[in-house]
Image (tube, rainbow, N blue to C red):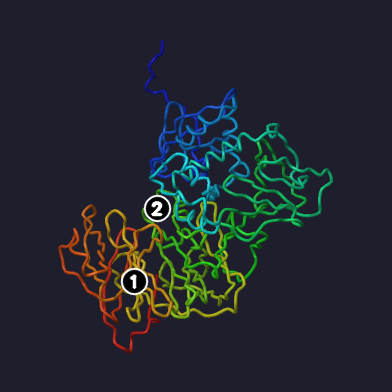
Amino acid sequence: MSHPKKPHEVVKFQHVRVHRQCGACGFLFVFGDHLVALRASSTRIIACDASTFAATGTPQTRATYLFCRHPHCRTCSAAADTATVHRDCFNLYSSRTELPDKLYRLLIFSIARYPWPRSTALLLPPTSDITRASKRAITLGIADFKMPGLAKLPPELTTVIRGYLGQHDLLRLCCVLETIDFIHLKGLDSPLSGPLRQVQFWHRGKLPIIARAGSSFPIEMTIDSRGIRCIERSGCSTAQLRSPFDVYTTVGVDDDLVINFQFGVGRLATPPPSGTLQLTDRPNLSPEAGFQFPSPKHGDRLATVDLDHCSGITFFLFNRNLHAIHAHTPAAPTADATFAQIEMTVQPFVSWVYVPNPPRDKISAFGVRIGITQGKLQLNQRTYFVRTPHRGDFYIGPPPVGPGLHYAVHTTLRSTLLCVVARNNLVVIRGVLTEGDACSVGTPVVPGNPPIQDACHALAILSCVKSIWIFRDKEAQFCRGLIVEYLDGTEKALGLCRIGVDLAERCGAVEQLSFKDVEQQERPKHRMVMVRGSRSQGKDTCDDGEWTVCSHGDTLEVWSTATQMVMTKTKLSDTNSSDTQAKVL
């Protein structure tokens, strides 16, 4: 007979860490996903219903378990490793796997996504077999996916299409099928453990090649969304140039690390000493290379932005401070995957600031302004400066007011931004690789009395315009941003242009562009803008005021935050019409 709890009794919950990434498919969890948590007891593997992935990080309780999302919780760190998977991924895996120890295998496979215990969540995107997805769509007869021809496309095109698909359910399904295939590999069940320095070569899904006598070459490890993918000696490394799916680290021959292998995956047995392993997104990247800006020393990972091969950069700002950065490339054309890595509690307040980098107007200089308080540099008070030949100088981040020091350098065709990704996944731009000479920065004028507090500001002159792209919110149809394309091949972004995420409409003539201010019904006093790209579009549902029609030579000025936008139009005199006037983002 059970007895009711006394009022003073307190239930002691067992902490179960909830990860950001599914252990079965590798995709990030999103709000509302149903979760299953795996944890090891003394005798078996327990699969717990972990409720849903909430928009906040508040712990959820069920029975005697507390499902914790705090990334640095000491109680979770001291407990045994856990795994978190989508419920539908778990059901698919369970139904297609007949092995008696299938839960244990899934737990080991999921844990291996973290290269060592208490490793920072790298949140790398998984690689999906889009050809298999296409064939699977045909096999299952899923008409909604409309992908019957993907299997016939060349790899270059499927890579581009994969970049636009994002977290497509069919890709998640295929990743789980690949996990099932991997789990069934033969001859890899026995656990192996030994010094990492004795491993000559290993690739995930294979047995390691061991040499009793240590090599004089350092060890290079390649890590992807599934954990350690490859271990090889630096003298015979096969690592290629930067990939959005991989990071790398080099282990010295004298480092005393132990690695465990089982079921085809490998993982370090203990966390490496602090500062021992530097993760980078390209092989053999030195943290001291290039032109260095004064920066905080902390940082788990080095990341790069190749200015020559990206068509634009999205800077994610929270409270006008840089939170994350995404380079738009053929392999990663949209920034939604990078945005998904930001904590969900912060996401609604993040501004997407897009800086075009077209071939005719490449970034030609980059710099940083660091604030000074009581005579000391405040390394976290950073405003970034960008220069292009046609757009001149503009800044990204907090307004450059008050005392501070400037550091800037010319960029060349081969220049690369060097960034530090901290343990909380915040980004600091640390310097420039393959740089030109140091240069000065023209400080743009900071607009006074902005109509929205803490807004990003930008302006563009509507002369010699080829077309204007209008980005609208999918649900409310409010304008989020504009990209003005000029006849000379240059571009200017206004507002928040969420490339590949928001609906985009092309306006072919300045005279067809019109706009008006509106208030959000669900948020009184929150201002937004409706924009039309054609006079023939008819009346809008919010057509309760006059529309402002643009004309050649006008200057559009936009203030924007994650939740508001204000747009104005002015007519500049001929003497003030240069687009090198105050430009800020």
Q: Residues within 10 Å of mark 2 (few under 14, many from 20)?
A: some
User: Which secondary structure lies at badge 1?
Assistant: strand
Q: Amino acid at mark 2?
A: Gln
Q: Amino acid at mark 1?
A: Ile
Quarter of the figure that contains the C terminus = bottom left
In the figure, 161 relative to 402: above or below? above
Alpha-carbon distance for marks 2 and 1? 27 Å
On the image, the x and y values in percent for residue 343 come to 44, 49
Q: Residue furthest bottom?
A: 575
Residue at which label 2 appears? 347
Q: Residue furthest top?
A: 1
Residue at (34, 59) in percent of width and height: 503
Quarter of the figure that contains the N terminus = top left
Q: Which mark is residue 273?
A: none
Which callout, 2 or 1, points to the residue nearer the camera?
Answer: 1
> Quick one: label 2 or label 1, which is nearer the N terminus?
2
In the depicted view, which residue is nearer to us: 164 or 435? Answer: 164
Residue at (74, 42) in percent of width and height: 208
In the depicted view, which residue is nearer to us: 427 or 228? Answer: 228
In the figure, 429 relative to 89: above or below? below
Residue at (23, 57) in percent of width and height: 520
Residue at (35, 76) in percent of width and height: 460
